[in-house]
Image (cartoon, rainbow, N blue to C red):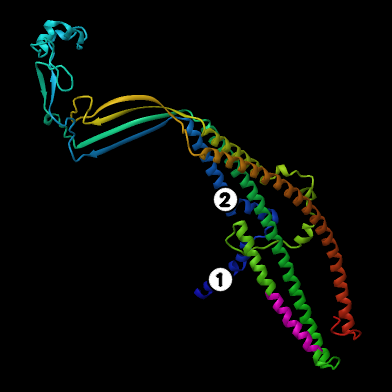
């Protein structure tokens, strides 16, 4: 009973395995290979990522129009104390009637009063005028002592923090041109995706038809080997009957060995071609199968794709060079803007500890500020002028590249149009030559078997 179950299990396993290769194998058409290449090709994916980066860069450039907020803070440890006074100072004392009661400010005119001057200054008894010191200043009767050691500020731990807002008002159109450059760069990146897709499609077509070509070469090599195998068998029979000499048989056997070598080379070339196609279309398994008789189906290609009337301005390369020319123009405008001033509106709020707004107490004190900053270089030894000349030359070079690209693309379109017509004609003639060759081979083999021709002619 167990042996019967084991036999059934083995039969089912063999049955399923026999269908596994068939189900895993998929015949790929040219359109399917193109679709897979557009979805999976790594170069296209990298080009799309570059386009995404360019889009983000454009968004970054747009933020330059908006105010910039920044926060700075820190801690500063000092080694020495501040000593504002190098020595003791004496401050003159004025009478109270010299102080304006309304404003609390000192009134110098009050010292012209003789009574006030007598109470304020040291008078010369001989002249009746205030005595003067070595510097020519009047000597006061009373001075207030301001000791230097008492003015020492020993604040070794210092903290600060600033919240700043900066808004550009005028930058010589630098921000505008930078945004234009970012926009042009994004357009170039998008067109590069289009160009990369076109290049990948061309590579896909070449790789696809290379596989088709090598498949046909493998078929040809196999048929040639089969022909020689049959020929060697016939010649062995003819040699055994004494119709031909041994040298004729040896010649056929040598060609038989060469045919086997050609089969191996064709199969190796086909395997490499399939690997190349698999890499382009993003397949991990290079075991690719293409439909039969694809060459006959492919001869009816779309002639409209090779229409020589297509304009070069629609090509991605030309569009990219146009955008590059626009970038050079914006770069020239940026160099021109360096001759103009930059005007910024700035404002913020700052905190400091010790507090300078409250007797330098060990606490945080803050205040706001607002201002306008104007910056403009005056003399740069001709740097801006040289950069301006360089920008002009780069723009002229970009224009030349664009003109040359248009000429080369027009020439390429015309050349490919001629090559396409030549290829179609060559394919038609080759079909006719193939039929003639098959008929000639058939007649030569019949004549050889009938003894009317020699082996070398076959």
The main secondary structure of the magenta stretch is helix
Q: Nearer the viewer, residue 275 or 178?
A: 178
Q: Which mark is residue 39?
A: none
The location of residue 397, given as percent across then percent down, is 64, 45
Q: Is residue 360 visible?
A: yes
Q: Is residue 289 left or right of residue 434?
A: left
The location of residue 258, given as percent across then percent down, is 73, 80
In the rendered image, residue 253 lying in the magenta stretch gets the answer yes
Instruction: Kindly give the residue lying farthest to the right in the view shown.
Output: 452
Q: Say which label, 1 or 2, has the lower sequence index.
A: 1
Q: What are the residue bounds of the magenta stretch?
A: 248-264
Q: Nearer the viewer, residue 118 or 263?
A: 118
Image: 56 above or below 425: above
Disc 2: which residue: 45
The location of residue 333, given as percent across then percent down, is 57, 35
Q: Nearer the viewer, residue 226 or 75?
A: 75
In the rendered image, residue 78 lying in the magenta stretch gets the answer no
* Quadrant, the C terminus: bottom right
Query: Dot 1: what SS?
Result: helix
Would you call the spot at circle 2 few (<14 residues within 10 Å), some (14-19), or many (20 or more)?
some
Q: Is residue 402 left or right of residue 60?
A: right
Residue at 19 percent of width and 30 percent of height = 84
Residue 123: quadrant of the picture: top left
Image: 369 above or below 211: above
Q: Which mark is residue 8?
A: 1
């Amino acid at each position: 009973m167990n042996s019967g179950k084991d036999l059934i299990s083995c039969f089912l396993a063999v049955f399923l395995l026999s269908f596994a290769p068939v189900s895993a194998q998929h015949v790929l058409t040219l359109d399917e290979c193109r679709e897979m290449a557009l979805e999976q090709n790594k170069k296209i994916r990298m080009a799309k990522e570059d386009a995404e980066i360019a889009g983000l860069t454009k968004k970054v450039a747009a933020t330059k129009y908006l105010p910039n907020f920044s926060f700075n803070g820190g801690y500063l440890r000092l080694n020495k104390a501040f000593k504002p006074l190098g020595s003791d100072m004496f401050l003159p004392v004025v009478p109270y009637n010299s102080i304006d009661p309304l404003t609390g400010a000192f009134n110098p005119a009050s010292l012209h009063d003789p009574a006030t001057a007598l109470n304020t200054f040291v008078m010369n008894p001989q002249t009746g005028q205030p005595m003067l010191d070595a510097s020519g200043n009047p000597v006061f009767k009373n001075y207030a002592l301001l000791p230097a050691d008492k003015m020492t500020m020993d604040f070794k731990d210092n903290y600060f923090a600033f919240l700043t807002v900066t808004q550009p008002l005028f930058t010589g159109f630098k921000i505008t041109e930078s945004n234009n450059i970012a926009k042009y760069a994004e357009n170039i990146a998008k067109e590069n995706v289009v160009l990369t897709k076109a290049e990948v499609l061309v590579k896909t077509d070449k790789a696809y038809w290379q596989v088709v070509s090598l498949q046909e070469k493998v078929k040809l090599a196999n048929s040639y080997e089969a022909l020689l195998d049959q020929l060697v068998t016939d010649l062995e029979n003819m040699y055994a009957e004494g119709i031909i000499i041994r040298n004729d048989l040896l010649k056929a056997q040598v060609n038989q060995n060469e045919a086997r070598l050609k089969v191996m080379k064709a199969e190796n070339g086909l395997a490499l071609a399939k690997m190349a196609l698999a890499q382009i279309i993003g397949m991990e398994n290079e075991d690719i199968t293409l439909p039969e008789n694809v060459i006959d189906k492919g001869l009816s290609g779309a002639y409209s794709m090779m229409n020589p009337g297509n304009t070069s301005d629609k090509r991605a390369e030309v569009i990219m060079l146009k955008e590059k020319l626009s970038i050079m123009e914006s770069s020239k405008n940026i160099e021109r803007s360096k001759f103009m001033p930059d005007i910024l509106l700035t404002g913020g709020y700052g905190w400091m500890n010790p507090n300078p707004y409250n007797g330098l107490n060990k606490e945080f004190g803050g205040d706001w500020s607002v201002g306008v900053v104007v910056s403009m270089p005056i003399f740069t030894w001709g740097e801006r002028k040289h950069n301006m000349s360089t920008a002009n030359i780069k723009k002229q070079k970009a224009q030349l590249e664009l003109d040359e690209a248009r000429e080369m693309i027009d020439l390429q379109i015309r050349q490919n149009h001629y090559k396409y017509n030549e290829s179609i004609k060559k394919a038609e003639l080759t079909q006719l030559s193939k039929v003639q060759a098959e008929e000639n081979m058939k007649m030569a083999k019949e004549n050889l078997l009938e003894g009317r021709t020699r082996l070398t002619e076959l």
